Image (spheres, rainbow, N blue to C red):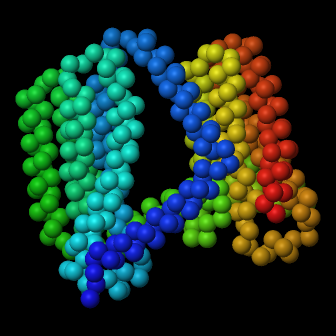
Amino acid sequence: MIDSKDLFKTRFKSHLKEVMRYFQYILNGHIAVAILFLIGAGAVFYQQLLTNIPDNFPTDWIVSLLFSLVALYNPIQNLLKEADLVFLLPAENRLTKYFNYTLWYSFLTQLYLVAIVVAGLAPLYHASGYNQSYAFLTFILIFFKGWHFLSNWWMLRIRDKMFQLKERSVRFLLQLIMLYSLINGHFVVAGLVAVSLLGYIFYFYHVSHRYPLAWDQLIEKDQRKMQSFYRLASMFTNVPYFKATIKKRRLLVKWLTRRIPFEQNSAYQFLYRITFTRSADYFGLYLRLTVLASIFLIFVDHLLMVFLFTLLFLFLTGLQLIPLWYHHRTNVWQDLYPISHKTKEAELLKWIEQLLFGQLFVSALTVLLTADIWQFIATALVGAVFVIGFSRIYVVRKLHAKK
């Protein structure tokens, strides 16, 4: 006899223990300090922007859009495993309480996102001078997020991806119109849209429950969510459960490797370049951090803050590139290469340095376009000193410390 409550407790304790273990590694390596600095600096500049906000600034659209996105973002984690498709599927009718527990867990763990968005938009909303109560809008957001959460849970019964996309698009559009109308005091329109949205969700409940619970989809989504977490954790420590995703990116690989000589000592130069390019864990993160650095620098005009943001993003990017050293640690064939450990290390340091100089070039170019030539030169010089010191001193010590 399966006890739903005991099953949930066992799965929840195991899941929490695993997540907390990897979080310890993620928050090490000065990442926590860098994040706190980024939040603090962002808050200061956000406050400065609010003092010069124009009268026609579309605050109503921004709040409505972000609130709607938060309301519809409801990933569900049922803590299922592959073997459950065989061992728990026959007992589905006795697992109602188990799924209820996991749904409460999934919903409550998402409220942090509500808190972040609500707190972040509150100064902008109040500075814009709207009459509608912001606390009331927050209550509406949480209320409808609960309904969208249930709708997402019911939608997992349906396998038609196009139907899911259309259904979610309709809900998003109705939610956006309702919030926009509410902010601007159009209560009749907001009420009619809210009733329509709730009616649509109830209708979808009857449509979705014509189908049985899709266990394979639930397990696949749980695995995908955990793989996303493992991808983040793999940047900081060894994660045996992580399955890296590979993308060919033929043109980019060809462009990055065409000048590499066909020589024995160039083997790791080739390996590191294609690993960085084909792995979404490095290439995607590098692009995102580079773009974010440029966006921040567009709104910064103080030279000291330009230095701090440039160096901060270079540091964060460099930390994410260090795991390239361990990426192929499980491949025994590397030990067969007649290449010295010193050559392997030198190629990694060289590649990290080149990537950081690439990001520095984009950041300095952003400063040149938004400031003047002297800030560009100063940023380039300070950044170059940091890149050389980071790659040749900090990274070397990190690699030797983990031997």
Quarter of the image where the N terminus is located: bottom left
Q: Residue at x 60, y 53 (%)?
A: 26
Q: Is residue 68 left or right of residue 19?
A: left
Q: Is residue 210 above or below residue 249?
A: below
State how many labels appear.
0
| Residue sticking out furthest to the bottom | 1
Q: Is residue 330 visible?
A: yes
Of residues 165 and 62, the one drawn nearer to the viewer in this rendering: 62
Q: Position of residue 171 (x, y in %)?
A: 22, 46
Of residues 304 and 169, the one drawn nearer to the viewer in this rendering: 304
Q: Is residue 10 left or right of residue 318?
A: left
Q: Is residue 19 above or below residue 284?
A: below
Q: Is residue 118 left or right of residue 148?
A: right
Q: Residue at x 13, y 32 (%)?
A: 190
Q: Is residue 169 visible?
A: no
Q: Is residue 44 left or right of residue 310?
A: left
Q: Is residue 3 above or below residue 359?
A: below
Quarter of the image where the C terminus is located: bottom right
Q: Position of residue 331 (x, y in %)?
A: 74, 73
Figure quadrant of residue 306 = top right
Q: Position of residue 204 (x, y in %)?
A: 15, 57
Q: Residue at x 72, y 57 (%)?
A: 324
Q: Position of residue 298 (x, y in %)?
A: 57, 22
